């Protein structure tokens, strides 16, 4: 049996002739924070809206909690897409109370108190939300999505526009929720922040899911390396073996050596002594952000 909370197979949404989401196969495991990364307009919001039943799919399949019977499984998800729907003339407490009434939940005082404490708004429970900062509104929006005790949380750009302190506050809440066993999908184009919390990533560009990879796979791909361009691959392999260098790969005549502690001068001289012409040797450092930008199709990702 699959341990995926969410799976999609060829999920597609077409508006006229344009495919906003194009045959996306996503896999989200139970208990992880899934960073959904892409430029603005790449299809992130459209995808999440289909999962939340805010948009009808054009094609493909959605499986939630191992079932394609979405009418029974969607009540297990919480959704915060675009701006939180708050009543500005009402207090934080009353906004939560109103949502409880809409869901038919009784005996709500204890739950509301716990949620306000979780998102750090217990001291402003009676303050009208029209006087809240953007970060406070986002935290209250998060609390509202948690009223029905969801197992899966869908968050679309929840840190967009927040100041550094607001971003930290949202991050700490999400990590607390993960500790409680909640699965979270968070879309964003803020790569640095997602890198601090996500266990798995999905990169979307022009409606297509370019790649899915775990944090460990990402770190492996983004390792620093020493790049050496040579004229004799076979002899170079023998030299590396003599030097006990085992962490490397090569394509045509270009070697990437991942043991960056090696002495480059010694490597160069040993290759030359063994008859290998070295065209260049230098340290290559591709950042995680560079990799994501390349996957998303270029530098103008914001």
Image (tube, grey):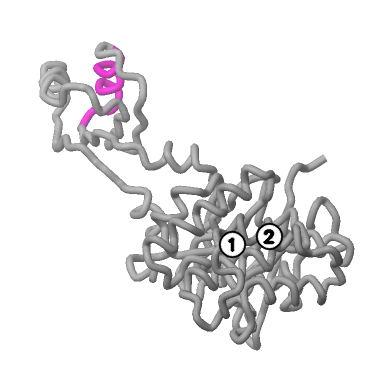
Q: Which residues are magenta?
A: 231-241
- List x then y, in percent, for residue 289: 36, 54
Q: Quadrant of residue 149?
A: bottom right
- List x then y, in percent, for residue 238: 29, 16
- List x then y, in percent, for residue 275: 14, 20
Instruction: Tell me how many marks there are.
Output: 2
Observer-nearest of 9 and 29: 29
| Residue shown at the point (69%, 76%) measured from the top left | 94
Magenta-colored segment: predominant secondary structure: helix
Q: CA distance from mark 1 to mark 2?
A: 7 Å
- List x then y, in percent, for residue 47: 64, 69
In the shown orientation, is residue 181 left or right of residue 263? right
Q: Residue 79: within the magenta?
A: no
Mark 1 touches mark 2? (CB < 8 Å):
yes
Residue 21: tell me if it is visible: no
| Residue shown at the point (84%, 63%) measured from the top left | 107
Mark 1 = which residue? Answer: 122
| Residue shown at the point (44%, 61%) measured from the top left | 167
Residue 180: tell me if it is visible: yes
Q: Residues within 10 Å of mark 1 (few under 14, many from 20)?
A: some
| Residue shown at the point (71%, 56%) measured from the top left | 152
Q: Is residue 241 above or below residue 49?
A: above
Q: Residues within 10 Å of mark 2 (few under 14, many from 20)?
A: some
Mark 2 = which residue? Answer: 113
Q: Quadrant of the N terminus?
A: top right
Which circle's residue, 1 or 2, is located before the other in the chain? Answer: 2
């Amino acid at each position: 049996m699959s341990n995926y909370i969410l799976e999609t197979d060829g999920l597609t949404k077409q508006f006229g002739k344009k495919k906003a989401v194009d045959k996306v196969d996503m896999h989200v495991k139970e208990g992880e924070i899934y960073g959904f990364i892409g430029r603005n307009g790449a299809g992130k919001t459209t995808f999440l809206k289909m999962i939340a039943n805010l948009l009808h799919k054009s094609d493909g399949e959605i499986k939630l909690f191992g079932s394609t019977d979405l009418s029974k499984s969607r009540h297990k998800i919480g959704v915060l897409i675009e701006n939180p729907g708050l009543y500005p003339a009402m207090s934080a407490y009353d906004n939560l109370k109103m949502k409880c009434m809409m869901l038919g939940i009784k005996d709500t005082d204890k739950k509301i108190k716990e949620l306000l404490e979780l998102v750090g708004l217990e001291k402003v429970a009676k303050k009208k939300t029209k006087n809240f900062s953007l970060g406070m509104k986002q935290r209250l929006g998060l609390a509202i999505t948690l009223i029905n005790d969801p197992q899966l949380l869908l968050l679309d750009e929840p840190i967009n526009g927040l100041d550094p302190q607001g971003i930290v506050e949202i991050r700490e809440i999400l990590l607390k929720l993960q500790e409680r066993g909640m699965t979270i999908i968070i879309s964003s184009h803020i790569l640095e922040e997602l890198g601090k919390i996500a266990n798995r990533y999905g990169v979307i560009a022009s409606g297509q899911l370019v790649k899915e990879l775990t944090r460990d796979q990402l770190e492996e791909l983004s390792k620093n390396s020493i790049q050496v361009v040579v004229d004799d691959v076979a002899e170079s392999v023998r030299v590396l073996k003599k030097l006990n260098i085992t962490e490397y790969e090569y394509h045509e005549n270009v070697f990437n050596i991942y043991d960056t502690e090696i002495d480059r001068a010694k490597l160069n001289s040993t290759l030359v002594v063994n008859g290998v012409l070295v065209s260049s040797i230098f340290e290559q450092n591709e950042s995680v952000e560079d990799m994501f930008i390349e996957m998303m199709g270029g530098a103008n990702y914001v």
